[in-house]
Structures are given as C-alpha cells and as structure tokens.
Amino acid sequence: MSYSESVRSYTGERFTDTDFTDATLTAVTFVKCDFRGVVLSGALLEKCRFSACAFDFARLNDALCRGTAFENCTFSGASLFVSVFDGCRCTGCNFAGADLTGWSVRGGVLDYCVFDGCMLRRQDFSGVSLRGANFSEADLEKADLSGCDLTETVFRNAKMKDADLRRAKWARTDIRFAKLQNTAIDLDGAVYLANCLGAVVR
C-alpha cells in the first residue's frame, strides 16, 4: 500500500516499496505495519505512533522523531545514523543489531527496550527513563546515564568504562556483572552496588 497524507491511521499495511526520504509525517498512527528495508532518511516523524511495527534493516539516517511513540517495534539491522529521538516514548522496542552511531536521544522514555550487544559509546541518555531496559553485552564506554531511572535495568557484561551513573535511580538494577572501570557513581549508587556485592557501607 502507498502512503497518503489524507489517511491518519494504518493497520497491518506493508510499506516496503515506499520511499519516505525527507518526508514529513505528523500525527499518523501505524499498527502492525511493515517498514522493513524502507528508507526514512531525513524524514520528520512528529507526534506519530508506531505499535508493533517492523523497521528491520530500514534506514532512518538523519531522521528526526519528535514526540513520537514506538511500542514493541523491532529495529534489527536498521541504521539510525545521526538520527534524533526528541521527547519520544519507546517501550518494549528491540534495537539489538541496529547501527546507533551518532544516535541522539533528548529526554523521553526507553522503558523495557533491548540494546543487547549495541555499540553505545559516548551515548547521552542523561535524564531518560530506562526502566527495565536490557543492555547485556552493550558497549557503554563514556556513556552518560546520569539522572536516569534504572529500575530493573540489566547491565549484564556491559562495558561501562568511564560511564557516568551519578544521580541515577536504583531499584532491582542488575549491575553485578557489568564491567566497571573508572565509572562515576554517587553515594546512593555506591551503597546500591555494595549491597549487590554483599558489602555494607558504614
């Protein structure tokens, strides 16, 4: 199916042959739609909603997503090179295998998203809600997670050299097996980490 600016909602449609390069999509809802391999480079996605959509191997290079919601979407093999998520709400999305080079996240929510094995060096997540997110095996060297909600977040075997975790909210966070080196934490973080390791701060 081809995209029409006059249609505000799509369900179960395939857009695999549609070119969204430099397109502007505003307040459009997509449910269970197929965007696999689609080019959205330079596109503006503003106040849209994508639910259970597949963006596998799509190209979102230099795309601006502003106030947009992504719910249970997949991005395996997708390229988000220098794309911007500004005030977006992403819940239950899978970014494992995506190219997140230069990806910019400005506020918003990334709850229960999967970043297994992702390269996220120098990524700025400051102030973002990361509740239940999975960063197993991810490279978070010099990443800024200051002020993030890390409730139930998983960092199993994540590389966190020189990462900033100050002012983060800790609750049932799985950080015991993260690879910490010169990682910045505050007193609350130190107490939580000590408790995880069976120690007591006195």
Image (tube, rainbow, N blue to C red):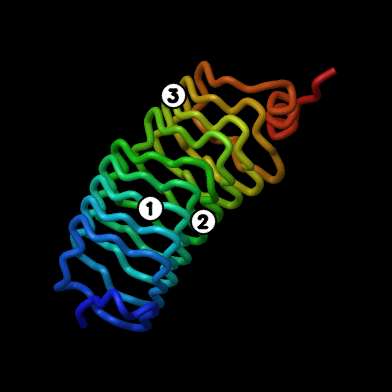
Q: Position of residue 122 (x, y in %)?
A: 39, 28
Q: Earlier in the sequence, mark 2 or mark 3?
A: 2
Decide: few, some or many residues near mark 3? Use Cα within 10 Å; few <14, some 14-19, many ≥20.
Answer: many
Q: Is residue 49 above or below residue 87?
A: below
Numbered tag placed on residue 89 in the rendering: 2
Most distant residue in the front direction: 6
What residue sits 38% from the left and 64% below the top?
26
Dot 3 corresponds to which residue?
A: 142
Decide: few, some or many residues near mark 2? Use Cα within 10 Å; few <14, some 14-19, many ≥20.
Answer: many
Dot 1 corresponds to which residue?
A: 65
Type of amino acid at the residue the image marks with label 2: Arg
Question: Disc 1 and disc 2: Cα gap in Å?
Answer: 10 Å
Q: Is residue 137 above or below residue 73?
A: above
Q: SS class of the residue under badge 2? A: strand
Q: Is residue 130 above or below residue 120?
A: below
- In this rendering, the count of numbered labels is 3
Q: Is residue 85 above or below residue 32?
A: above
Q: Position of residue 156 (x, y in %)?
A: 51, 41
Residue contact at pointers 2 and 3, CB within 8 angstroms:
no
Numbered tag placed on residue 75 in the rendering: none
Which quadrant: the N terminus? bottom left
Type of amino acid at the residue the image marks with label 1: Cys
Q: Earlier in the sequence, mark 1 or mark 3?
A: 1
The image quarter in which residue 77 lies: bottom left
Q: Position of residue 50 (x, y in %)?
A: 41, 68
Question: Disc 2 and disc 3: Cα gap in Å?
Answer: 24 Å
Type of amino acid at the residue the image marks with label 3: Lys
